[in-house]
Image (spheres, rainbow, N blue to C red):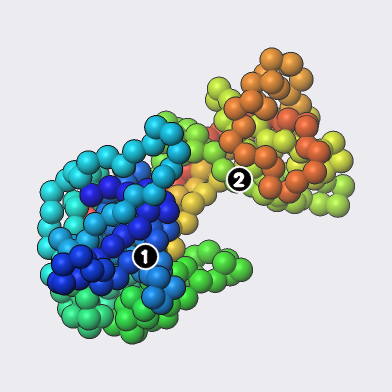
Amino acid sequence: MRAQLGDQLVIDSPTAGTTRRDGEIVGLHHADGTPPYDVRWSDTDEVTLVFPGPDAHVRHLEHGPGSTAGPSGGSTAEVGGVSHSTPRETGPNPGDIGRRVAAERGRQGLSREETARRAAMAPDYLAYLEEHPADPGLATLIRLAAALGTSVASLRGGGIDLPPGRGHALLHPRLRDLSPDECRALLSTHGVGRVAVSTPGGPVVVPVNYEVIDDAIAYRTMPDAAPAAAVGAEAAFEVDRVDEAMSQGWSVLLVGPARVVTEPDVVRRLAEQAHTEPWAGGKREMWVSIQPKQLTGRRIGPSDR
């Protein structure tokens, strides 16, 4: 079974030729259009995650010339009495909600089966939520929150205005130094980092969108903005990631001389390959690069014990 956004999922009635329920497919979880789907039901207007069973079929809408819905593919497995196509993936790729559920379940020493029983859901469905990106409906989240003694907001990652790292520490954490190659690999993911510079008003640390070019990092700013104060001096640049769900993360620190990028071909290359516009907005066309003289990093994660 395969579908595209806008198709209808129809649940057939035991009475031949009649429909028991139908809804619009408003979310896909796999690029090839295989189940599960987020479906907005026509009778309730509620959106739920659906694993289509043998009594379901997709009614395809016209999606333009040349667009087709491919043939059914994948093996089937039972989830709470209904079948679904096994996702064609190389391994688990959990979403944030699933990881938070698994982490909280682990902290409480609950098995997947016991958690599923408390939440009144099939263990295989809970396994899917924990191992694949998914956006379960509110009713599912309420049951899971009650089963784990937490809140829906916590499972959804509430607290965007709070600083990271407020969760519980790992039971047996391990802090290790990263090699230069590991640091370069983590820096190459791009995103947002922090540049530390000295200004007439004192030292400041400013977040910037950055790119990697050759072995240096580069960011866009304005001549009178704080990040521009790095030019002509040694600056420190730091990037990190904190995994709130798993209470682990890493940080990389780069220290070196900063300069304005003036070579036209390099400026053009940076502008063309930039992964995003500066989040701060405005006309920021001055590129500053920092060439590393020191490159260090640390990662905290579970110990091997």
| Residue found 54% across the figure and 38% down from its top | 190
Q: Quarter of the image holding residue 65?
A: top left
Pointer 1 residue: 23
Residue 294 appears left or right of 267: left
Name the residue nearer the viewer: 30 or 56: 56
| Residue found 68% across the figure and 47% down from its top | 279
The local secondary structure at tag 1 comes to strand
| Residue found 69% across the figure and 42% down from its top | 278
Tell me where residue 32 appears, x and y as whole percent.
31, 42
Tell me where residue 48 appears, x and y as whole percent.
36, 69
Tell me where residue 80 appears, x and y as whole percent.
16, 71
| Residue found 36% across the figure and 78% down from its top | 139
Q: State the mark number for residue 189.
A: none
Residue 192 appears left or right of 146: right
> Pointer 1: residues within 10 angstroms few (<14), some, or many (20+)?
many
Pointer 2 residue: 193
Q: Quadrant of the C terminus?
A: bottom left
Does 35 sit above or below residue 40? above
Question: Marks 1 and 2, how far apart in space?
Answer: 43 Å
Tell me where residue 44 appears, x and y as whole percent.
41, 77
Using the rendered image of the protein, determine whether residue 166 is visible from the camera's viewpoint: yes
Name the residue nearer the viewer: 292 or 289: 289
| Amino acid residing under circle 2 | Gly
- Which mark is first along the chain, 2 or 1? 1
User: Closer to the observer: label 1 or label 2?
Assistant: 1
Name the residue nearer the viewer: 18 or 110: 18
Does 283 sit above or below residue 22? above
| Amino acid residing under circle 1 | Gly
The local secondary structure at tag 2 comes to strand
